[in-house]
Image (cartoon, rainbow, N blue to C red):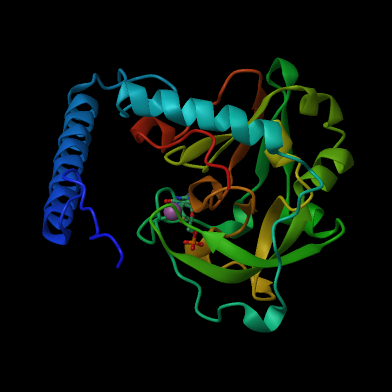
Amino acid sequence: MSAPEKKSKKELTIEQKINRRNFISFASFTVLAAGAFEGWRWLYKSPEEAAGGITAGARVPLRRALNQTELIFRRVFSPNHLVKTYPKSMAAKHVRVNSDIGVEAAKKFDPATWTLKVIKKGGEVLQITLQELMALPKTEIVYDFKCVEGWDQISHWGGVKFSDFIKHFQLDEYTKMEYVGMETPDKTYYLGLDMPSAMHPQTMLAYEMNDKLLPLEHGAPLRLIIPVKYGIKNIKRIGTISFSNNRPKDYWAERGYDYYSGL
Ligand SMILES: Nc1nc2c(c(=O)[nH]1)N[C@H]1C(S)=C(S)[C@@H](COP(=O)(O)O)O[C@H]1N2
Ligand SMILES: [Mo]
């Protein structure tokens, strides 16, 4: 006969095991929830960046995190890394109009009298017509345009590569500077771009959408299409381009958004 099974006193019954697991789960959940709440409270109570700077309006720790992210993004950035493109047939026929600062329908604007202004050293201003830009080699792209507000849309644009524009107008020396600044003719929308992103082979000064000249609400006569960035950096109706070693002022960075806004 076999010896009776010896049951260790320490062994728990199934029920005890379940109770113990339940306790552990609840305890960990409570600790994590309290931690998350404290973290949120800490962030919420942390000071906000001062107004009036190049970046403003974000909680200081958040801005620090954004700046750290930028450093990582910049390290992995490569002009050889291209944004995914699609066949023309996939481009949206009805392209969403998102925001209209500096291109408001109520504002009188005549594309025919427009010129692109490039601020050179010593304040010299180069004035370029749309015809001059359209005479340069044309480039097209169909890609997924992404807005920070959470929507994206495959869209089709045509224009001149920013790097071709630089070469043609002999602005090469300015690409040694760190930033490009752009603003609408009325100066109400403005932004800054790091030079490597501006010179990326898919960045273009666009004058066409879906094979037709840009409609006013999409930024006629000339807008920026910069696929390596979120929508906010794709300025509609460019009036002025400038170059600088300091971050140019940026409408959305002043309102708490990431200055870099890379994808
Ligand atoms: N001048 C100007 N450019 C702008 C904006 C704006 O309000 N004014 N909004 C930006 C934002 S947030 C997005 S998502 C895209 C939208 O471009 P779309 O209206 O052509 O879709 O334009 C960007 N460029
Ligand atoms: Mo956007």
Q: Residue at x 14, y 47 (%)?
A: 26
Q: In front: 134, or 262?
A: 262
Quarter holding the N terminus is bottom left
Residue 13: quarter of image:
bottom left
On the image, the x and y values in percent for residue 209 come to 63, 70
Q: Give the image quadrant in which the ligand numbered 2 is located.
A: bottom left
Q: Nearer the viewer, residue 33 or 54?
A: 33
Q: Between 132 and 150, which is closer to the camera in this rendering?
A: 150
Classify residue 164 as left or right of residue 253: right
User: In the figure, residue 233 lies in which quadrant?
Assistant: top right
Q: Is residue 109 left or right of residue 161?
A: left
Query: Where is residue 194 shown, x and y percent of the image?
Result: 64, 32
Which of 192 and 207 lies nearest the eye of the viewer? 192
Give percent across and percent down for residue 93.
55, 81
Task: Give the answer, above or below, for where 250 lies relative to 61.
Answer: below
- Residue at image position (87%, 59%) is 137
State the residue at coordinates (18%, 44%).
24
Report the side of 45 relative to 242 (left or right): left
Q: From what the image shows, is residue 49 above or below residue 150?
A: above
